[in-house]
């Protein structure tokens, strides 16, 4: 995955620049520094209670600042997360929830640093963007005075207030799991002193990973990558202090989403959403914190769409009307909320759709495609040694029921009590004791889907068609074009199993609206062959549906549940389609059926046809890897 940041070699260059502030500047408005890191959950950082973590710089920030226990990314993979950060709008409104889809957003939705520039701030980004919007180059140019690996506060006019972002890649998934161990040794371990390294046996293994020496060797990468991250942050903060700017700068520290190991990143659960988040205030601006400073801990709920209005407010700018997040600092602070709405959609080649509601303690996730398991095929994860170990342990029957469940179809709903079950081991959705909580959260989710007019209930095939002429954000507002209530009535059945549900889904398979039919057939994908058998003829007929996404899914059901030979031929045709969204649907369908052999030659042709188009090509490699025709190594990622 292509990312820009301060490299290990570039960091010393920070100290070669002459300070712009030889004399201390008198603060009028705060400077704002964002320190963002990659792929990290709070439970792996010392100030969040992990006694094995070696994160003294972050811990010191928290000891002197404000630590948030309920901060959440709006998504669980980098580009949708960053879309929400930079636009201040939920991705299920902009239609940018699918990782690296890059669809159009309206012209009035700008990168929020634009509004800081209007307020007189110098804005710099060093240097990751990955904003997942069409026309990204122009979007970046408008938002930032400078966005590069040389950008920083040092290029502003003397005395000009700044908003500076630095993104550190040392804890990225590439370091913790994707690249080979020797690469990690060179990139991480060799840059740490012995007392900065966490040994293989010097931590507690999360219970959903098998506790073996091989797995510990891999998981220690998380601790050591974060240790190096902490070290790099220390260098940046030293530069800030050397430039006599620390006493006029509010420092934000946070991760872009949850842990980059299997089951975290890309999964719509707490382990994927919740992030470490700390704000440090200099004495001159301590009054902007409603909680106080110096080691304060707050359980106030925030998510990434709150960042844009908060920073604009701190800078004295005008908050545009399309921002629905709330300022949580300063004079324009709004009242805290009692729950948040989060979302998770496609990550690379791994299709999924999850909508989440949390009050901080309970995390409810609605899985709309639960026939796909938590450790679904995503090429960037499949090539990691830890994922291969997990699959080997599964095949050797070494996993306990919890560990094995990660490879099995999910339930339609998860409900986890994070206060008493941090690692999300016990799903409370079926527990009668929690039925009242469950019903209330279901109601909240439905209200938000309809209020926000969640455009991601359209298949990506449709969002792409819309984006060619308009924007998903604007399209979703027209109820005649997008009758969401009718669509959601059918989508709300998806993932629930049983004869009664199947009967209701079949009734909707003849609906005039193609998206309703899409959700009907998608919901049937989670039903067992025994439940589907009475509807065999109608499902076979749906293979000829004029709406291609329906035809793809009907063909997948017809082959997977009934072994229909015509369905196999239909899937082969879709795998070679000129529409990449249909191809990705078809190849993903084949990853979750038992009899894959009839499709090997077709997938090889598809891979050749789409070589260079990452999502489709990666899905093909996952298929070929699952049947043993290509190795699951970084050399085979395209």
Image (cartoon, rainbow, N blue to C red):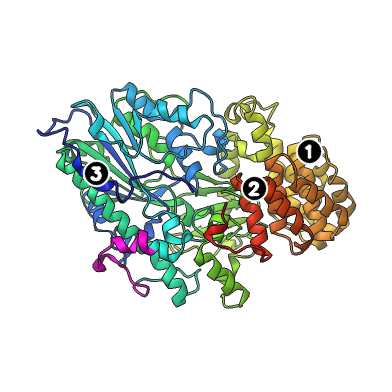
Q: Where in the figure is residue 548, as x and y percent of width and height? A: 77, 40
Q: In this image, 484 relative to 505: left or right?
A: left
Q: Residue at x 48, y 26 (%)?
A: 109
User: Mark 2: which secondary structure?
Assistant: helix
* Outermost right residue: 537
Residue 351 visible in the displayed image: no
Question: What is the span of residues highlighted in magenta in the rendered image?
Answer: 185-202
Tell me which label, 2 or 1, sits earlier in the chain. Answer: 1
Q: What label does residue 13 carry, if any?
A: 3
Q: What label does residue 547 carry, if any?
A: 1
Q: Where in the figure is residue 390, as x and y percent of width and height? A: 55, 69
Q: Work out whether residue 387 or residue 433 is closer to the camera in this orientation and state it.
A: 387
* Outermost left residue: 23
Q: Residue at x 61, y 55 (%)?
A: 413
User: Is disc 1 surrounded by few (<14), some (14 to 19) or many (20+) residues within 10 Å?
Assistant: some
25 over 555 or under it: above or below? above
Residue 195 lies in the magenta-colored region: yes
User: Mark 1: which secondary structure?
Assistant: loop
Q: Nearer the viewer, mark 2 or mark 1?
A: 2
Q: In this image, 150 relative to 73: left or right?
A: left
Mark 2–mark 1 CB contact (< 8 Å):
no
Say which residue label 2 marks: 616
User: Mark 3: which secondary structure?
Assistant: helix
User: Is disc 3 surrounded by few (<14), some (14 to 19) or many (20+) residues within 10 Å?
Assistant: few
Residue 453 lies in the magenta-colored region: no
């Amino acid at each position: 995955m292509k990312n820009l940041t301060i490299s290990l070699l570039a960091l010393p260059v920070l100290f070669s620049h002459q300070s712009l502030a030889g004399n201390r500047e008198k603060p009028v408005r705060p400077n704002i520094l964002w320190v963002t890191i990659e792929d990290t959950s709070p439970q792996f950082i010392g100030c969040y209670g992990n006694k094995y973590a070696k994160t003294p710089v972050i811990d010191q920030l928290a000891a002197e600042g404000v630590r948030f226990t309920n901060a959440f990314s709006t998504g669980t993979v980098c580009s949708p997360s960053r879309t929400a950060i930079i636009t201040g709008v939920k991705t299920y409104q902009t239609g940018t929830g699918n990782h690296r889809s890059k669809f159009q957003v309206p012209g009035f939705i700008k990168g929020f640093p634009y509004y800081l520039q209007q307020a007189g701030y110098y804005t710099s980004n060093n240097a990751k963007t990955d904003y997942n919007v069409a026309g990204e180059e122009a979007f970046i140019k408008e938002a930032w005075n400078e966005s590069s690996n040389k950008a920083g506060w040092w290029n502003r006019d003397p005395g000009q207030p700044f908003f500076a972002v630095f993104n550190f890649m040392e804890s990225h998934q590439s370091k913790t799991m994707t690249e080979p161990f020797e690469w990690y040794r060179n990139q991480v371990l060799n840059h740490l002193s012995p007392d900065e390294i966490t040994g293989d046996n010097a931590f507690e293994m999360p219970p959903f990973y098998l506790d073996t020496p091989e797995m510990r060797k891999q998981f220690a990468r998380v601790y050591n990558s974060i240790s190096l991250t902490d070290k790099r942050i220390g260098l940046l903060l030293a530069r800030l202090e050397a430039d006599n700017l620390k006493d006029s700068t509010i420092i934000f520290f946070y991760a872009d989403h949850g842990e980059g190991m299997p089951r975290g990143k890309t999964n719509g659960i707490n382990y994927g959403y919740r992030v470490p988040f700390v704000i440090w205030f200099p004495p001159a601006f301590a009054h902007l914190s409603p909680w106080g400073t110096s080691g304060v801990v707050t359980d106030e709920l925030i998510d990434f769409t709150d960042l844009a209005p908060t920073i604009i407010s701190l800078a004295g700018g005008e908050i545009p009307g399309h921002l629905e997040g709330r300022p949580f600092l300063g004079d324009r602070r709004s009242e805290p909320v009692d729950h948040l709405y989060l979302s998770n959609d496609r990550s690379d080649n791994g299709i999924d759709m999850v909508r989440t509601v949390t009050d901080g303690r309970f995390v409810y996730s609605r899985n709309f495609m639960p026939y796909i398991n938590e450790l679904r095929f995503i090429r960037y994860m499949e090539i990691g040694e830890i994922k291969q170990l997990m699959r080997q342990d599964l095949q050797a029957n070494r996993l306990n029921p919890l560990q094995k469940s990660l490879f099995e179809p999910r339930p339609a709903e998860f409900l986890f009590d994070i206060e008493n079950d941090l690692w999300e081991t016990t799903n409370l959705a079926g527990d009668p004791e929690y039925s009242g909580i469950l019903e209330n959260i279901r109601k909240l989710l439905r209200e938000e889907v309809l209020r926000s007019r969640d455009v991601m209930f359209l298949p990506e095939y449709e969002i792409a068609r819309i984006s060619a002429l308009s924007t998903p954000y604007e399209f979703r507002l027209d109820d005649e074009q997008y009758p969401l209530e009718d669509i959601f009535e059918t989508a709300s059945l998806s993932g629930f199993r049983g004869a009664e549900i199947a009967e209701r889904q079949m009734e909707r398979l003849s609906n005039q609206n193609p998206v309703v039919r899409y959700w009907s057939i998608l919901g049937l994908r989670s039903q067992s062959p025994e439940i589907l058998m009475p509807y065999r003829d109608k499902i076979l007929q749906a293979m000829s549906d004029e709406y291609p996404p329906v035809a793809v899914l009907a063909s997948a059901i017809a082959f997977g549940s009934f072994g229909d030979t015509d369905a196999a031929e239909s899937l082969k045709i879709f795998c070679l389609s000129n529409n990449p969204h249909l191809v990705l649907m078809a190849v993903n369908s084949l990853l979750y059926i038992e009899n894959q052999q009839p499709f090997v030659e077709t997938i090889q042709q598809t891979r050749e046809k789409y070589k260079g188009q990452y999502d489709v090509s990666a899905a093909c490699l996952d298929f070929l890897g699952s049947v043993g025709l290509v190795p699951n190594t970084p050399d085979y990622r395209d």
